[in-house]
Image (tube, rainbow, N blue to C red):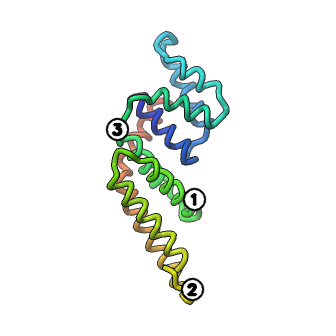
Amino acid sequence: MEQKIIADVYRLGLLIHFFTVEEVIHWVDHYIEKNDVKDIPFAFFDLSLTKDRGRAIELLSQISHGYKGALSIQILLGLVYHNWNDANAKSIINEVHQLASLMNTDLLLSGTLMALVDQYEEALKGYGNPRICEHVRKEYEREAIEEIKDVLAHYETDAMLWVNAEDSMR
């Protein structure tokens, strides 16, 4: 997989707190070890030494500069789905919301995700009905979560590109 795409996936992942700086450093250190020093852009070395999330995002932006494709978003959506855990659904839905707000390549998908997140938020409130039973509200919430998962499931194959790239680094 092209380094610009990998850098963009990590950049977006850091922005939504899906990845940690340590995971990014692990990737960049491995890249530095496997490639000829004279062929490695300086930003990789700087990234390898940073511990600051903001600086890492800035350096990843430099590395991915010029990449305008949707694949990095699709990979990250697939990874979010692949790592789905109902116990932390609220934080995952927050990641989806943040990712949708960052999209500029697929406005239809962004709008769909935003609408689904809004629907989830309304379900948590019982769609504005203060008298709604808790079990009915939970059912609304479950249905909204399933709709989000159904959309994310379409990107699971994109996540496999990432998993395969990660495996090839080992």
Disc 1 vs disc 3: which is toward the camera? Answer: 3
Q: CA distance from mark 2 to mark 3?
A: 44 Å
Q: Which of the 4 image quadrants contains residue 119? A: bottom left
Q: Which residue is mark 1?
A: 91
| The one of 157 and 135 positioned closer to us in this rendering | 135
* Secondary structure category for the residue under label 3: loop
Give residue 15's position: percent from left, percent from top.
Answer: 55, 44
Q: Is residue 1 visible?
A: no
Left/right of residue 153 with respect to residue 20 in the rendered view: left
Report, in whole angstroms, how far the alpha carbon at label 2 lies from the one at label 1. 24 Å
Residue at 49 percent across and 18 percent down: it is 41
Residue 139, x across and y down, in percent: 49, 79
Q: Which mark is residue 69?
A: 3
Could you say whether the residue bearing mark 1 is in a helix, strand or loop? Answer: helix
Earlier residue among tags 2 and 3: 3
Q: CA distance from mark 1 to mark 3?
A: 26 Å
Q: Is residue 43 visible?
A: yes
Q: Amino acid at mark 2?
A: Pro
Reading the image, the residue beneath label 2 is 130
